[in-house]
Structure formats: C-alpha cells, structure tokens
Amino acid sequence: MGIYLDNAATSYPKPQKVIESMTNFMMDIGATSGRGAYETAIQSDMLVYQVRKGITDLFHFNDVKKVIFTLNATESLNVALKGILNKGDHVITSSIEHNAVWRCLKTLERDIGITISVVSCSKEGFTNPFEVENAICEDTALVVFNHASNVLGTLQPIKEIGEICRKYEIPFLVDAAQTAGVYPIDVIDNNINLLAFTGHKGLLGPMGTGGLVINWKGDIKPIKSGGTGGDSTYEYQPDYYPNRLESGTLNVPGIVGLGEGIKYIQKVGVNKIYHKEKELLEYAFNQLHEIEGITVYGPQDSEKIIGVISFNLKDKSCDEVAYKLGRQFGIMIRAGLHCAPTAHEIIGTKTTGTCRIGIGYFNEKKDIDFLIEALQKINK
Ligand SMILES: Cc1ncc(COP(=O)(O)O)c(C=O)c1O
C-alpha cells in the first residue's frame, strides 16, 4: 500500500470497527433516523443519539441536542458564519485561515456587506490575543479562528481569545478541523461558543461526516430548510435543536462510522494520540534538518503545533517532490497551497506552495525514516 503521510487531508487507515459498523448498519438496520416508529428506525435513532453523546463527551460539552451533524467542517463553518452574520456586522479572524472560513467570509463581505478585520500573525503562525481585543468594535458580531493551521500546524491561543470574546460577549467560532481527535478540546473551559469539526481527519470517521457544537444561546438562521421528520405541518424550519440546523435525511452510516472513530479515540485517549504524534514530529524535525537545502516552515517546536510539517527542497518544485515521493517511493504527501493561500503569504510561499507531511496516529518512526531516505535520493 505504501506510506501514508497525508493525514492532514484525511486520516488513513481507519480503525476496523469504523468500517465494520458502517457495513453492519447498511446490512442489518438501514433505516432513516428521526422518521419512523418501527424497530430498525428506532435503532437508527438510538445510534445517532449515541454518537451525538460521544461528541459531547469528547469535547466536554453537556447539551446533546446542540450537536449538529453536517457533511464536513466546511459545511459546519458555513452553517455558523452564514447563520449568524448579518448586513453591517463586523467579524474578526486570523491571517492564517483555511478557505473554508476565508472564502465564506469574503462571500458574505461581497454579497451582504459584512466587514472583516484580519489579525495578522507572526511568520510562525502565532496570533497575539491582545490584537483580537484591539480589533473589537461596536459592530463586532463574531470572532472566528482556526485551532491549528493546516499549513504550519501552529496552535492558536484559543483559550485566551475565548476569554476576550466572553468578556465582550461576542460569540467565538473555532475551526477545529485539524485538532478534533488529536488535541484535547474542552468547549466550556476554552470559552468556545461554536466548534466546527470534521469527521474524517483526526476523529477517524468516514468522509461526509462533520458537525457543529453549539455552546451559545444566540440565533443561528438555518441556511437550509426541509424535512426533519417532525412538525411537518409547520411551514418553516423548527426553532428547536438539532432540527433547526439539520434538514434532510442524515448520513446515518457515516455517523455510525464516526461514532466508532470517536470510541476508538476515547479508548486510546486523546492525550496518548497527541503525545505519539508529538514524538513523531520531533523525530521528523531532527532528521529533516539533515537534508541539504531544505526549508522547513513554521515553529518547528512540537509543543506548539499539531502533526503538520510544511517544507520545500531547494531548486525543486513541491509538485515534483510530492510526485516523485508518490511514484518512485510510494510515499503519499500533499503539495501546493493546501486551500489556505493567506497562510502561504505569511511564509512567502504563495507562488511556490509547499510539500506538506500530515502525521497520524497510525504512523511509525520507520515511515519518517523512509521519507527522509527518499528525500535524500530525490535531492541528488
Ligand atoms: C483548518 C481547516 N479548516 C477546514 C477544513 C475543511 O475541512 P473539510 O474538508 O472536512 O470540510 C480543513 C481541511 O483540510 C482544514 O484543514
């Protein structure tokens, strides 16, 4: 199969139980959730409820109804941003966001007239929370930050930013696409009002799963309307959760698989996953530095990042390096702008892009050894 080092895009492999649970659901249950009273429909309801509960436990939250299922982090962020922001609103964000946030904000700026303040971060991707406070104005309706950058891995000071948001009573939306499942997240302790997560990366679930945890009492206008299985004569989307933000038939097989991914994580422990990835990061940094002509971007400090490393080899394009790693050595990494052009402005790689390694829980030191050996050969 080769060596998979693209876990920042999606995690691979998935625990066997993730796959089995989805197949079992499709074969033995197969009913929709929230719509029927027969036995398999109720089983489907129970399974979905248990996954919502698993999510609240993982993120130390307490309201199962306020966990919304979506297709991915992008949809969760759209639900939150488009559901909260109105004409004339001001929003504060970082200069190192994924397009899932950035394009959504730019679209709202163009289409409904919001204003955006971008708090600039250091070359290593760190944001100073005080700059967030300085950017707050009367119209500030939301602060949105990624928890960790998908280009540099840099972790943002979300607890401190969350405290500032709480002080000014401004909702705080966190894009946890890169951290959910691989870094401890406590929604209450970290002062997070809205947590957008994806199911297919660190949570070890299938693609097509994700969600939004809502620890906030404000209104979120639904961006979709449709069937929920209840109150069918009411002509608008219901006001209560989760139905308010969930329209149409849920991806129950996917949600069941996600539930097994979360169970796996809880069994191993997020801290253990984090520490294993941290150890691999340190191992990789030590060896990468021995490659002649390499530029490694970001903090290069395993305490300050999650399992993502961006680099370039002198005189070689990132596409060429990634292509050769894949074709000649069976090593899978990503090359390009990683859907985060503003992050590349910070490190000066907007025209070149970077090679990106995404370390996952199932990687081992030997994977890094193979990568280093292959890079040495490509360098010759
Ligand atoms: C920081 C960040 N935000 C959002 C996303 C979007 O996630 P998804 O593709 O699951 O919608 C990604 C995916 O790479 C990401 O890294």
Image (cartoon, rainbow, N blue to C red):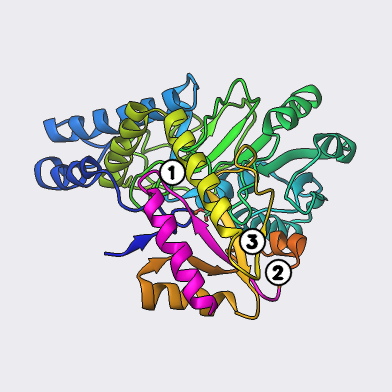
Q: Nearer the viewer, mark 3 or mark 2?
A: 2
In contact (CB < 8 Å): disc 2 and disc 1: no
How packed mark 2 is, by other alpha carbons closer than 10 Å (few <14, some 14-19, many 20 or more), is some
On screen, 191 above or below 202? above
Q: Is the shortest distance between ligand 1 and the CB of mark 3 under 8 Å?
A: yes
Nearer to me, 359 or 133? 359
Q: Earlier in the sequence, mark 3 or mark 1?
A: 1
Q: CA distance from mark 3 to mark 1?
A: 19 Å
Q: Nearer the viewer, mark 2 or mark 1?
A: 2
Q: Which residue is mark 2?
A: 349
Amino acid marked by disc 1: Gly
Nearer to me, 137 or 160? 160
Q: Earlier in the sequence, mark 3 or mark 2?
A: 3
Q: CA distance from mark 3 to mark 2?
A: 11 Å
Nearer to me, 17 or 162? 17
Magenta stretch bounds:
351-380
How packed mark 3 is, by other alpha carbons closer than 10 Å (few <14, some 14-19, many 20 or more), is many
The secondary element bearing badge 2 is classed as loop
- Residue 220 belongs to magenta span: no
Q: Is the shortest distance between ligand 1 and the CB of mark 2 under 8 Å?
A: no
